[in-house]
Image (cartoon, rainbow, N blue to C red):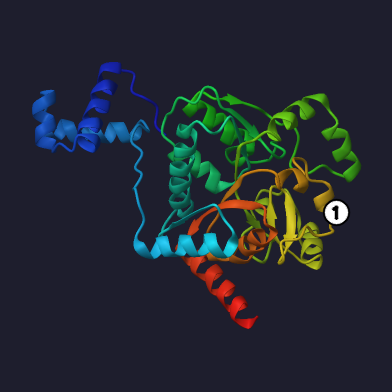
Amino acid sequence: MKPRPENHSEADLALRAAWLSYVGGYTQADIADRLGVSRMKVHRLVAMAHDMGAVQVFIEGSPEALILLEDGLKEKMDLETCIVVPELPAEAENAQANLGRAAAHYLKSRLESGGVDVLGLGWGRSLAEMVNCLPVMDCSAVRMVPVLGSVVRKMSLNPYDVIHRLVDKTGGEGYLLPVPLFADTAQHREVLMAQRSVQDVMGVAVQADLTMVGLGAVPDMGHSLLMELGEIDEAAAESLREAGAVAEILGQFLDAHGQRVECGINERALGLSMEQLRRHHIVAVAGGEEKVEAIRAVLASGLLKGLITDEAVARRILASADASSDSL
């Protein structure tokens, strides 16, 4: 996002032009007349409003085909919420932005409803895009807390950075869980989790009314952000594959049936336990055909109350669910 212009009157003019254009529905000629500037100036002002991050576009409603997919997934996967976004062309530069925009719309409506006092957050590119797409709001009464370790090597994707930027946009109260995603050993995990500062944050995290998360695949079975960021190495990836893991949610690895695998890395994850997570209202934001198996496994776990995904993933998951039903 580009910084706001130093000339505040120019910034105010840009906001006014954007309001007249997107909310008022005025033409550039109409806006030019109302503001006493040229049409070219109006074009530059609206572009400035975009650069300031003041313009966020949400499209209300879904095409009928997507609604049918949403209803099908809710029924088959016992979900309370399902949002399916149109599939983007293969050459699209940032598929996560599509999911992020839908997730931002969902989160905005939940925050505006007043039913979220504590917002739990995972990590990943889709959640980072969700925050990018969220408009500025007044949610000063909401506490925003990570539900897993916040220290990773790439700052732009770690849970605390997601919360930090969310706090900037909402005025909410943010928390830091000052531990890594994975401890070196299970014994180290026990020591870290016993720290008073960690216990205090965990005490807030268990109260989350809504928890937004991303999902990951096991390396070589789909894209793994954990592998990309160096949080797990090839030896750990091999042990996960041998254990039958196909999906990761909040540092916990699951098999194709949604069961937590017996693997050392699961004993080293820092954050809420699976038992605690089952009491949360978890909404996952994940898409891309390389994550179909991972998404299907997490759905099988029963952890999710909601899913925000793309059209291609929804079709494949529903097709496999229908095939399983037919074989019974």
Q: Which residue is mark 1?
A: 264
Residue at the extreme right: 187
Q: Is residue 281 visible?
A: yes
Q: Position of residue 83 (x, y in %)?
A: 47, 54
Q: Is residue 87 visible?
A: no
Q: Position of residue 216 (x, y in %)?
A: 64, 55
In the image, what residue occupies the spot 45% across and 24% down?
A: 138
Q: Nearer the viewer, residue 101 or 180?
A: 101
Residue at the extreme bottom: 327
Q: Position of residue 293 (x, y in %)?
A: 63, 66
* In this picture, residue 169 sits left or right of residue 65: right
Q: Residue 163 is drawn in which quadrant?
A: top right
Q: Nearer the viewer, residue 275 or 9?
A: 275
Q: Amino acid at mark 1?
A: Gly
In the image, what residue occupies the spot 25% across and 32% down?
A: 18
Per the image, label 1 sits on a secondary structure element best described as helix
* In this picture, residue 227 sits left or right of residue 81: right
Q: Residue 299 is drawn in which quadrant?
A: bottom right
* In this picture, residue 132 sits left or right of residue 204: left
Give the answer, above or below, for where 48 lies relative to 83: above
Give the answer, above or below, for where 216 lies relative to 222: above
Q: Quadrant of the N terminus?
A: top left
For disc 1, the neighbor class at 10 Å (few under 14, some 14 to 19, many from 20) is some
In the image, what residue occupies the spot 64% across and 32% down?
A: 145
Give the answer, above or below, for where 309 lies relative to 100: below
